[in-house]
Image (spheres, helix red, strand yellow):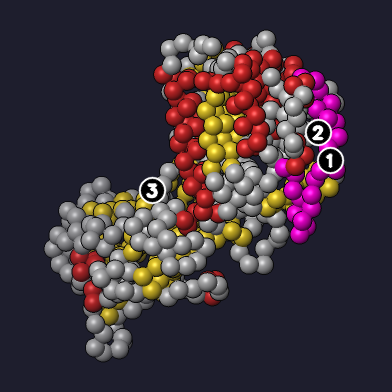
Amino acid sequence: MVATSRTLSTRVWPLHLVKPTRGLVDEKLKVIVRNLNPRQEVTLRCVHQDVWEGFGHYISDQHGTVTVAKDASMGGTYKGVEAMGLMWSMQPVPGSRKGLRTLSTRVWPLLLVKPTRGLVDEKLKVIVRNLNPRQEVTLRCVHQSEDKDVWEGFGHYISDQHGTVTVAKDASMGGTYKGVEAMGLMWSMQPVPGSRKGLRLRKKHVLSPMVFHISVFDGHITQGFSQLTALATHAVERWYVAPGVQRVYLQEKGVQGTLFIPPGPGPFPGLLDLWGGGGGLVEYRAALLASHGFVSFALEYLSSEEINAPTTDVKYFEAAYQILKSHAMVQKDRLALFGLSFGSTIALSMAAYSKIIKPRCCVCISGSHVNAVQRTLSETFQEIAKNVSKIRVEDGQVIWRDIILPIPADPSMKIDVGQIKCPVLLVNGSDDQNLATVESAEDMERMMEKAGNRHLLQVLTYPGAGHLIEPPYTPHHRTSNFVIGKDKVLMLWGGQAKPHADAQEDSWEKIVAFLQQHLYFTGSQAKL
């Protein structure tokens, strides 16, 4: 829509407001023009593909405003007060072919995606309407990562007798996933053909969203999407931070990391978030946990110029815990440890041995109690390196899991989990090829049964899941690039896409419930 006029103010430009800018065809538009001269004559015109047009002649009021829903058109393709006259009065422009049918005779496919903006662990509702009955279509989700790599997931569908596809109810016949999968477009995503090898989709800058474009194409398509025109496309924003979550980078007492604080007056329960041996500062899980009401401290303890593994020891983690505990927005007696992989080993070590770290509960994903962290990280890694000969390489993929097998019988080579006095949730995948987590969990159960604290241990083991159990709908990575020392290798993490996706969705729900139970709802510390 454009507005034209016989006179134009030289000082204040006219302001043309149209709402909504995106909506259903049966929604009314609100069209207003402001900043005109008083009693100025203008024409409002709506044009579609330079072929169809509707227009009305208006005179602004004493304030220089035209409100289409209230003011009368003096002429054009319609007259009088007509809120939608610009639409229903449209006709072919002069010189067009004769016999053109009205626009209303063609019904275009309608793609509905809700929510268009939400957290990454929220389910999407995807529906396509106005298709032909039993029409074959492909739904595709595409995302460009922060590293400029392109990821895609797609499913093949057949519309019902009403010309509708409902992703949560209808089965995909093929593509990157099959069957009834409400979130298959997300969790089945993989790099497009021709991409670099060993990619892993991870969010680095959590204060910006991950933007996905969901499109519907005619027919069952498997490649060449960029050469085709979609029937409809919808953009979706997926966030790790909820509105109001604060991100605060901390560098204090030799400790560094990022604190995420939920919106609201507080104080809130807190947790220390520990990632694995890949190092670096990984923020996205802590950001998502803060979005669920926990002050989350994403701790960096490897791969930094300021952090030196040969000298980093238990005191580093105790200092981080004290920083979290002393924060004004944190409930000092409601703290937890959350670890993945080597981060789980640290969490278990601190819970068992530290005189300072006294968590209400611990969540340990894909971790082990072998090789306790009681000295410096460098010394711990030296112990692990003694079994480096057990590492296997098959088809160019590094398999790490045997490095702690068989689980040592010598108690001095393991964390004494019998000393742990808080509830512990272990989350493991049966196809973990990076660490013998299932065997570790079984040995921990035996040790805690003997020590009398088995009732504090809850174990979730997911068939077909691998090592990298992340927040729900994160794409599955059976392998990815990983740096060991100065060498980049292709690490085998394990797992199959569908069971791994199921494990991520189920475990996340149980993890959040576990944290809520022990940090929000439990009145006193669990006792032996």
**Label 3: element kind:** loop
Which of the two marks, 3 or 2, is nearer to us in this view?
2
161 above or below 12? below
Q: Nearer the viewer, residue 453 or 297?
A: 453
- Residue count near mark 2 (Cα–Cα under 10 Å), binned few <14, some 14–19, many ≥20: some
Amino acid type at circle 1 is Val
Real-space Cα separation, disc 2 to disc 1, in angstroms:
7 Å
Q: Decide which of 155, 270 is in the foreground and name it.
A: 155
Residue at the image point whose x is 43% and y is 43% from the top: 122
User: Is mark 3 in CB contact (under 8 Å) with mark 2?
Assistant: no
Which amino acid is tagged 2?
Answer: Ile
- Give the quarter of the image for residue 430: top right
In terms of sequence position, does the residue under pointer 3 or pointer 2 come before the other? 3
Q: Which label belongs to residue 115?
A: 3
The quarter of the picture where residue 323 lies is: top right
Closest to the observer, 367 or 250: 367
Q: Return the x and y of residue 246 as percentages of the image width and height.
A: 53, 29
Residue underneath mark 2:
384
* Rendering coords of residue 365 (x, y %): 60, 35
Q: Which mark is residue 388?
A: 1
